[in-house]
Image: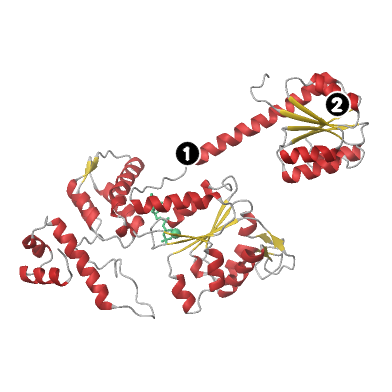
Amino acid sequence: MASMIDYTVFVVDDEESIRDAAQLTLTQYKVRTFPTAEEALVAIQESPPDLVLMDIGLPGMSGVEALKRVKQSHPEVLFIMITAYEDVDTVVAAMKYGAYDYVVKPLHMDKLRTNIANALQTIRLRKEVRALQERYLRENLPCFIGESNTIQDVLEFVAMVAKSPDAPVLIVGETGTGKELIASAIHFQSPNFAGPLVTLNCAALPGELLESELFGYEGGAFSGAKAHGKAGLIEQAAGGTLFLDEVGDLSQEAQAKLLRFLDAGEYYKVGGTKKLTTRTRVVSATNRDLTAMIEHGAFRSDLYYRLAVLKIVVPSLNKRRADILPLARHFLLEYAKKYDKNFSGISAEAQDFLVQRSWPGNVRELKSIMERGVLASQGPELGLGDLGKSGEAPGPAGGGGANGRGGLPALSPQGLDLTLLLEDVERDYLEQALALAEGSDVKAAELLSLNYHTLRYRKKKLGIA
Ligand SMILES: Nc1ncnc2c1ncn2[C@@H]1O[C@H](COP(=O)(O)OP(=O)(O)OP(=O)(O)O)[C@@H](O)[C@H]1O
Ligand SMILES: [Mg+2]
């Protein structure tokens, strides 16, 4: 059991002979000795050892009290307690506070050496298991594909945000942009990653159920409640991450309660009177315009500021077209594997089509089009026809319809500037047409079913070179 690692062992005993014997016997470890618990505590706070051999009956602070304190700040430190006689009560107390083992005086140094070696072997195994778990989690994360500068900036920010284990994060962006994927990236890159990631879809439940889901309820809190009550998701997410999806759909009441939890770290179960506290990081996401909702009184601004201590804006796919093909290839491979088909790539026309069309449903829409394409295609190359069969894929010249407003904003009660908006749309299509036509006005006009002079006129009016 020769160990490659240098373990540190602290020996705390008021008897000098025991300290000396330990020093002489435990030569394979870095040993430091202390006559009192007080002195040992100072040293442990400075630099915690792997193991403490702690006498129970010390003058001043008792060994059990010292154990209790160290376990609070450094739960990983192992304790072997030394007791003068087999005082069952004290030994039981020590075990309850997390001591690993105990030895009875007079000490047999050989036996003590074995006890210590066993204990250290346990932490070595524990550390190895943990490292394996960590590796497994990190290697099996769903990949987040993105090569555009825009998304690289977002990912850099995500990595930074993840480092703090407590700060609330709000993720905003259109539907299908990858908010949920980012929420899980935050969890797994954060120090909370070994804890649970608990998700609540706030839109899926009516107000009352949602509250009891989030905060839990006491037995008999309402009709249909389980007799012994239930732990809420906040409680289940202790030490991990609580992901509140579609947070814009929280009822006013739930908003007030969530605010109190975020403000003071306190909450009550439904029907409960006991104040509860839980430490978890709250990540929330929405595709709704919370600022507009605040103006209409539908969302509390104080809650908004609490949730959005850190805010991540995920750009729409239309604004990061460099990501389209990498994503498409990624999904192609994913579905080829899933449906056991062979694909070598995407045809040039199909690529052009994917890059140029509008993506109101963002990455989710691209993903489902690729899935249907893979199913429809004979392979080995995914062609334009395979994508066409997906039906609801209106290209720049396509039929619209199924996608409704497309990527355009909904008309909110604050209104919008229709002229500007239409100009934007027009400019976008003109530029796309000119790019496709490689600068030829005649071809561009054809692509847009415009007469050549009209195209020239619109170009000039919109200031397109
Ligand atoms: N960058 C990406 N790389 C790989 N897959 C992605 C990426 N972005 C999104 N996806 C996939 O697209 C789908 C939609 O993403 P997600 O569910 O995270 O969107 P969302 O922003 O939460 O949408 P909604 O607002 O509708 O809930 C998921 O299957 C997700 O795995
Ligand atoms: Mg989502």
Q: Quadrant of residue 458?
A: bottom left
Residue 329 position, x and y percent, is: 30, 45
Q: Quadrant of residue 1?
A: top right
Tag 1 near tag 2, CB within 8 Å = no
Q: Is residue 290 left or right of residue 219?
A: left
Query: Is residue 40 placed above or below 233 in the rendered structure?
Result: above
The location of residue 351, given as percent across then percent down, is 22, 49
Q: Quadrant of ligand 1?
A: bottom left
Q: Quadrant of the C terminus?
A: bottom left
| Residue 307 drawn at (x, y percent) | 54, 64
Would residue 402 appear left or right of 53 to someone viewing this image?
left
Q: Position of residue 432 (x, y in %)?
A: 18, 60
Callout 1 crowding tier (Cα within 10 Å): few <14, some 14–19, many ≥20: few
| Image label count | 2
Precedes in sequence: disc 1 or disc 2: 2
Left or right placement of residue 456 versus residue 141 in this view:
left
Q: Amino acid at mark 2?
A: Arg
Identify the mark at residue 19; answer none if there is no mark: 2
Callout 1 secondary element: helix
In the depicted structure, whether residue 412 falls above or below residue 125: below
Q: Which residue is mark 1?
A: 139
| Residue 408 in sight from this viewpoint | yes
